[in-house]
């Protein structure tokens, strides 16, 4: 792990391999460790940079205003990278899309797994599903909240916890407990948003875009994946991966890498 000053914050990242640059952006319930199944495979052909977004994992969170998409470009500047492919899962996918729209000259490709986009609104179906699967939890109880979020996102709406690898659930809950502390701290800081947001600007994405989801992810996420692939001029929709939910790269690294490696090398 290395730390580097980006826009006034010490951000943590791991780097390995040589070749064209690939930046990995983690989910909001995780940190850079979620890419453990991708880094060794990608590093055989690429310079792989796995970042902890500001406030998450081992990255710091000063109280000054910032934007995640500006931090990504700040990282590229600091590491001497002119252009990079951005690979994002969930919230990391949202940051990747915002970066490509805010700084199009710095992004060579996008690979998005279970990604929302800025400006998207959840359906009533998803809101009701949260109430059914999670319900009310004390936001100060990080353990209970993490268990609920992992039930909702990592297990997913169509599986039972006993259907999922218990080590995956344990690891996801451990990462999410740390992420919840980050989100609590972030709520007190001015975080810049892309303006206008990405939801109505997908046609501006001029780079190749790979979009994938788990078959057991939320219907909203799968519909949004269809929309991204349809509206991005160079969008490609992966088939949904069976027996996988929101953290597709972590849960199904073999299937993820089988799609990601040729995409990044093309």
Image: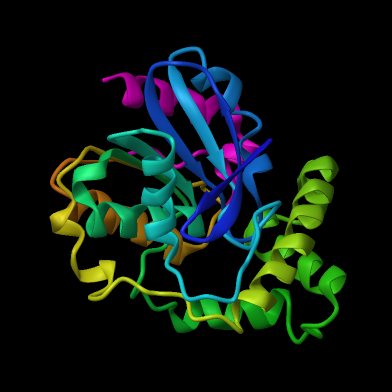
Can residue 94 be seen in the rendering of this structure?
A: no
Q: Nearer the viewer, residue 163 or 55?
A: 55
Query: How far across and how far down the image is residue 96, in percent?
Result: 38, 52
Residue 54 sits in which quadrant? bottom right
| Residue at 42% from the left image edge and 32% from the top image edge | 22
Position of the C terminus by quadrant: top left
Q: In the rendered view of the protein, which quadrant contains the N terminus?
A: top right
Asked if residue 42 lies left or right of residue 259, the reply is: right
Q: Which residues are magenta?
A: 237-266
Residue 229 located left or right of residue 132: left
Is residue 74 in view?
yes
x and y, in percent, of residue 148 in the image: 76, 70
Q: Is residue 183 above or below residue 38?
A: below
Q: How many marks?
A: 0
Q: Nearer the viewer, residue 24 or 241?
A: 24
**Which image quadrant for residue 208?**
top left
Position of residue 227 measured from the top left corner of the image (x, y, whole percent): 26, 58
Q: How is the image coloured?
A: rainbow
């Amino acid at each position: 792990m290395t730390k580097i000053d980006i826009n006034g914050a010490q951000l943590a990242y791991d780097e390995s391999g040589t070749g064209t640059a690939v930046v990995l952006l983690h989910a909001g319930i995780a940190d850079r460790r979620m890419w453990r199944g991708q880094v060794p495979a990608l590093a055989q052909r690429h310079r792989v940079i796995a970042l902890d977004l500001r406030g998450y994992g081992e990255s710091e969170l000063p109280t000054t205003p910032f934007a995640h998409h500006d931090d990504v470009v700040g990282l590229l500047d600091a590491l001497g990278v002119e252009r990079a492919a951005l690979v994002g899962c969930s919230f990391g996918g949202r940051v990747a899309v915002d970066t490509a729209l805010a700084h199009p000259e710095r992004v060579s490709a996008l690979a998005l797994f279970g990604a929302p986009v800025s400006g998207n609104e959840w359906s009533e179906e998803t809101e009701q599903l949260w109430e059914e699967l999670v319900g009310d939890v004390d936001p100060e109880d990080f353990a209970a909240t993490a268990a609920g979020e992992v039930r909702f996102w990592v297990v997913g709406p169509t599986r039972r916890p006993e259907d999922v690898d218990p080590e995956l659930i344990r690891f996801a809950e451990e990462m999410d407990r740390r992420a919840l502390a980050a989100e609590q701290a972030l709520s007190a800081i001015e975080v810049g948003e892309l303006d206008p947001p990405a939801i109505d600007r997908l046609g501006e994405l001029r780079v190749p875009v790979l979009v994938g989801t788990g078959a057991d992810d939320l219907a909203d996420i799968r519909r949004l994946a269809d929309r991204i692939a349809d509206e991005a001029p160079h969008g490609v929709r992966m088939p949904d991966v069976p027996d996988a939910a929101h953290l597709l790269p972590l849960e199904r690294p073999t299937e993820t890498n089988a799609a990601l490696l040729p995409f990044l090398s093309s």
